[in-house]
């Protein structure tokens, strides 16, 4: 079963369960968890977190569908969240939570229990996005000061920063060993070597890209102002396939995961989940993309302005 969490401009947090066996998207909970718009969500196992413009991080137990705590260590809106869960972690439970904020800092938390470990000053202006390396030893951030920064999570300090030619809004490590990372600046998507940040590939999304989801075999899914879901072959820099007009308005969140019952599948991703600012969440089967206009496997309408989406698959 996949658990999905979406945040909205109207301060509501939404939880859903998607069962691949029955192709059903079932609402689990929805309530106003923040006193301002929700800007970021993250999940790991049965744990979820949301960050809002109220400077707060809310924590959730997805199994109990309940809010379990609040973290108040930032002095600005919380703009990005990321869990670190080791591959050996039972049930995918996280070891750490990282948060980024408009205050230009990254907070590092122990996730069992949730205890604030350190605040790392990282950017001169607000941070737009945050990504944790699969080893849990480093994290990347991009800020509104048009800089890329690397945080050494072992030592708890910023170890590298460089100026970008334009302000980036998204940064993500690729699947697997994290040998590559992706950055998005408006409609431009770039692929970099994680060792030295060297540019490997550059792709043009035509319109502004608002969300990405790395998948296996070097595939990167993007969504944004064009209302479509695009799968990029990041090795060649070409579009592998696209779900045109996946939504009626811009796509604000994407999640990919494999069907746990189909472990032998060679598909890059069996399922793609998309969320749009019109409040609709849709689940797609990547293997249907050969069709001219694939139909979603399941969908639900929250009737709110969705701003972000996160999800994880658990047995």
Image (tube, rainbow, N blue to C red):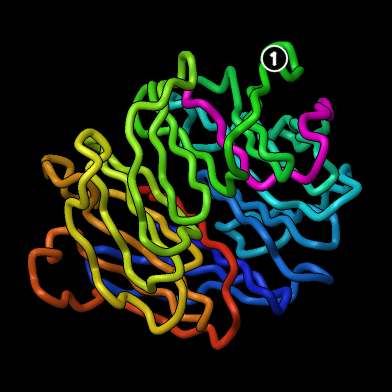
Residue that appears at 58% across and 17% down: 137
**Extreme residue in the front direction:** 165
- Work out whether 4 lies above or below 146: below
Residue that appears at 45% across and 33% down: 173
Task: Describe residue 262's horizontal placement relative to residue 248 as left or right.
Answer: left
Task: Describe residue 178's horizontal placement relative to residue 12 as left or right.
Answer: left
Residue that appears at 75% across and 18% down: 156
- Work out whether 190 lies above or below 110: below
The location of residue 192, given as percent across then percent down, is 41, 27
**Extreme residue in the right direction:** 75
Q: Which residues are magenta?
A: 118-134
**Disc 1: CA contacts within 10 A as few (<14), some (14-19) or many (>=20):** few
**Extreme residue in the top direction:** 155
The location of residue 186, given as percent across then percent down, is 51, 55
Residue under numbered circle 1: 159
Residue 275 on the magenta span = no
The location of residue 52, given as percent across then percent down, is 76, 60
Task: Describe residue 199's horizontal placement relative to residue 133 as left or right.
Answer: left
- Work out whether 272 lies above or below 299: above
Residue that appears at 36% across and 33% down: 175
| Foreground pick, 53 / 87 | 53
Quadrant that contains the N terminus? bottom left
């Amino acid at each position: 079963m996949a658990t999905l969490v979406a945040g909205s401009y109207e301060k509501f947090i939404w939880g859903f369960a998607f069962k691949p066996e029955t192709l059903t998207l079932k609402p689990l909970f929805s309530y106003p968890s923040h006193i301002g718009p929700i800007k970021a969500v993250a999940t790991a196992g049965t744990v979820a977190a949301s960050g809002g413009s109220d400077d707060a991080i809310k924590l959730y137990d997805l199994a109990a569908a309940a809010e379990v705590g609040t973290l108040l260590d930032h002095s600005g809106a919380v703009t990005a969240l990321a869990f670190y869960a080791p591959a050996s972690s039972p049930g995918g439970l996280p070891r750490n939570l990282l948060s980024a904020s408009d205050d230009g800092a990254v907070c590092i938390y122990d996730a069992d229990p949730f205890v604030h470990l350190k605040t790392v000053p990282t950017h001169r202006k607000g941070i737009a996005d945050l990504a944790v390396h699969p080893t849990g030893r480093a994290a990347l951030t991009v800020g509104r000061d048009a800089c890329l920064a690397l945080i050494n999570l072992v030592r708890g300090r910023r170890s590298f920063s460089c100026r970008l030619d334009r302000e980036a809004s998204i940064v993500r490590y690729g699947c697997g060993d994290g040998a590559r990372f992706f950055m998005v600046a408006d409609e431009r998507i770039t692929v970099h070597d994680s060792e030295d940040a060297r540019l490997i590939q550059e792709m043009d999304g035509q319109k502004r890209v608002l969300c990405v989801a790395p998948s296996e075999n070097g595939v990167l899914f993007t969504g944004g102002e064009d209302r479509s879901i695009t799968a990029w072959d990041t090795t060649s820099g070409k579009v592998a396939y696209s779900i045109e007009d996946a939504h009626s308005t811009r796509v604000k969140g994407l999640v990919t995961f494999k069907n746990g019952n189909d472990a032998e599948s060679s598909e890059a991703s069996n399922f793609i989940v998309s969320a749009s600012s019109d409040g609709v969440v849709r689940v797609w089967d990547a293997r249907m993309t050969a069709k001219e206009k694939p139909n979603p496997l399941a969908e639900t309408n929250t009737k709110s302005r969705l701003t972000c989406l996160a999800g994880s698959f658990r047995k």
